[in-house]
DNA sequence: CTGAAAGCGCTTACAG
DNA sequence: CTGAAAGCGCTTACAG
């Protein structure tokens, strides 16, 4: 690893001259500049990043805190992941991956250790330990998601509560009065997974307010057997369910529609089905009415917010930015028919 | 950000004493040690990582070079990704994400810049520019995959050529003489995607050696329409095809089986189908005979190799380590029947 | 058992 | 237009 001294020696100048040539912060004689550039080229000089940050320069690295739970859906996850990384790269930032279930030590380590300029949070919980630690760190933290304890971070998220109300209003307008919300894996709610809970709670509340009968059942799994058991229970409790919201994924929803068919229910003539908080359904050939997540836009915005903070353009920690979701209609929601 | 000086001042000792307390490289008086630890605790001291590496300590960061192509399948990809990261974490290493199509500048930047201790390569091409750069870097490079120009890197991969021969031998033993290999997206072969090509070429060669008629058709897409067009072509060229190897993914294979059925071919009675170089089929409810990739084991081994190199246990750059793949039978390959 | 000092590779006032 | 020197926050010989 050639250092600045090697370049200086080879070019016959001082190291400060080399530094200034590289940074362009000083006007340098044409001939000198040429010699330095040539020497740097020849020895393959790359400034040592550690030394630069030790002198107060930014690291140009962002930490990406993405806890992996045993119920984490990799494929879904990767989309957020790559979207953030690609956007960060646009600004010249690299991503330092932080995987850890419930990790907050990690945040302190990389932030206090001076390894990163900022931290991005993924897979945010309602009460997120990381958002708590954020307050004590000297680097900005942007959460892709909206924790209840959001005052130490910048939050960027879809408005899942609004989506919950929108879904219910839609069903209500179509005449549905008994609605089942099929949740994701139950652990996710127990852990406090932010978006699932916000959507569910808002939907349940709105349904109640409109005098509807709302049911919520988290999934035990996504197989046909799991779906069947869940439907057995649900219809036993309330045979009048005519609309189902599903917070899961493409294979599960396919199984759901199969299971309904086996019971003699066609979608949407007998039962209306809507996916919510989902992503990538269409790619998986699953055409269902949907209030989808929009990972790319949310991620892009999150990185942009980070850049605004890092560049000093803003300083309003605790700010929450909600993005809209747009309803995709594929004809699986329809007016309730008497059975 | 509290530094070592703050701790020293608070504890009333010199900074070297603080350093030695933290590292445990010197015996320190009980009372002194206690005071230092207490002070460190109180000010929330985390040693600055940059300063440490400037003094010759390892960064404890590995770069993960994972080019994203427009045909990259995120979900498949993420599995490698996470497997590598999880394993690295076990050894106390963080992962610095490097996304870049055809990036080799990036490798030089992070390696020469002193940001990482080693580099992991994903999505390796037959002639991989990164493997070329590796020779000029002062950090070890481990490729998850086997480039032709493998002499500058450590390679860990499944033995895709062996898999190609195995697939053909299997078909041959079952009486098949006309075989179609349905490839992944054609760009991948044009780019030189290592594993797809090694499998295909080995299979084509073995088939020829055994006097079989081999066909290869890369995919233009994975939709039902794409599959149908491909089959039109293939059966037009050779109506006697009785076995198909498929280097694609679950939705595509489902479409393939549908398309065969529409033509009046049942699997496996009329046509045998095998997936090869695939992953995650079972999770996607796609039960097809398979010579699968095994991302977790390959990734674990790749990180282990990196650790062996970093710890000085080995120094045999250019080494290639092949791992076996095991055939999964689900009954979609059967003895050829006259039609 | 502990401290003063050199030095890692840079950047940037300070001087000329 | 260019150089000598201080200093970022550590680690570790060198001294006592």
Image (tube, coloured by chain):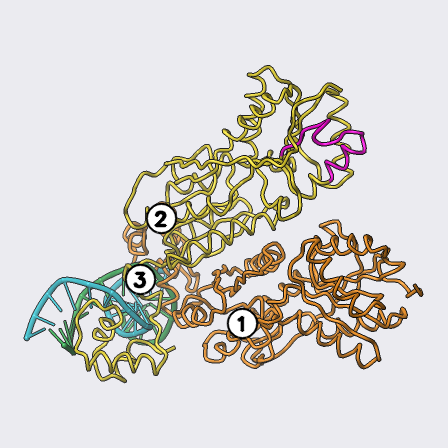
Chain colours: A yellow, B orange, C cyan, D green
Magenta range is A255-274
- Find out whether residue A244 is within the magenta segment: no
The numbered mark at residue B216 is none
**Nearer to me, A111 or A153:** A153
Looking at the image, which residue is at 65% across and 58% down? Answer: B221
Q: Is residue A9 left or right of residue A247?
A: left
Label 3, residues with CA under 10 Å away: few <14, some 14-19, many ≥20: some
Marks 3 and 2 share the same chain: yes
**Chain to which the residue tagged by mark 2 belongs:** A
Looking at the image, which residue is at 81% across and 70% down? Answer: B238
Label 1, residues with CA under 10 Å away: few <14, some 14-19, many ≥20: few
Q: Secondary structure at mark 1?
A: loop
CA separation, marks 1 and 2? Answer: 33 Å
Above or below, comparing residue B171 to residue A194 in the picture: below
Q: Is residue B295 left or right of residue A200?
A: right
**Nearer to me, B294 or B334:** B334
Residue found at the very far top of the displayed protein? A211
Of circles 3 and 2, the one toward us is 2
The numbered mark at residue A54 is 3
Picture quarter with the C terminus of chain A: top right
Marks 1 and 2 share the same chain: no
CA separation, marks 3 and 2? Answer: 16 Å
Of circles 1 and 3, the one toward us is 3
The numbered mark at residue A139 is 2
Label 1, on which residue? B311
**Nearer to me, D15 or B299:** B299
Number of numbered discs present?
A: 3
**Chain to which the residue tagged by mark 3 belongs:** A
């Amino acid at each position: 690893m050639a250092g600045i001294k090697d370049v200086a020696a080879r070019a016959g100048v001082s190291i400060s001259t080399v530094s200034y040539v590289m940074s362009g912060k000083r006007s340098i004689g044409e001939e000198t500049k040429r010699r330095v550039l040539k020497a740097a080229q020849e020895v393959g000089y790359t400034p040592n990043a550690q030394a630069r940050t030790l002198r107060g320069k930014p690291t140009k690295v962002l930490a990406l805190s993405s806890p992996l739970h045993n119920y984490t859906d990799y494929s879904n996850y990767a989309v957020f992941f790559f979207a953030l990384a690609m956007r960060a790269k646009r600004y010249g930032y690299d991503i330092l991956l932080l995987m850890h279930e419930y990790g907050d030590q990690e945040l302190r380590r990389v932030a206090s250790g001076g390894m990163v300029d900022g931290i991005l949070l993924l897979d945010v919980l309602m009460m997120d330990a990381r958002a708590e630690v954020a307050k004590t760190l000297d680097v900005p933290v942007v959460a892709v998601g909206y924790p209840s304890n959001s005052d130490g971070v910048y939050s960027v998220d879809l408005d899942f509560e609004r989506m919950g109300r929108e879904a219910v209003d839609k069903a209500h307008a179509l005449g549905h009065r008994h609605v089942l919300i099929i949740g994701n894996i139950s652990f996710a709610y127990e852990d406090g997974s932010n978006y699932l809970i916000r959507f569910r709670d808002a939907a349940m509340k709105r349904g109640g307010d409109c005098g509807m009968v709302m049911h919520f059942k988290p999934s035990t799994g996504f197989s046909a057997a799991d779906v069947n058991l869940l439907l057995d229970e649900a219809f036993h409790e309330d045979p009048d369910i005519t609309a189902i919201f599903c917070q899961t994924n493409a294979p599960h929803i396919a199984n759901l529609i199969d299971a309904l068919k086996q019971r003699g229910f066609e979608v949407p003539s007998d039962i209306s089905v809507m996916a919510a908080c989902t992503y990538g359904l269409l790619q998986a050939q699953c055409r269902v009415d949907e209030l989808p997540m929009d990972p790319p836009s949310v991620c892009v915005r999150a990185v942009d917010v980070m850049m605004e903070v890092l560049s000093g353009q803003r300083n309003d920690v605790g700010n929450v930015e909600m993005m809209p979701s747009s309803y995709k209609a594929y004809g699986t929601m329809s007016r309730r028919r008497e059975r």
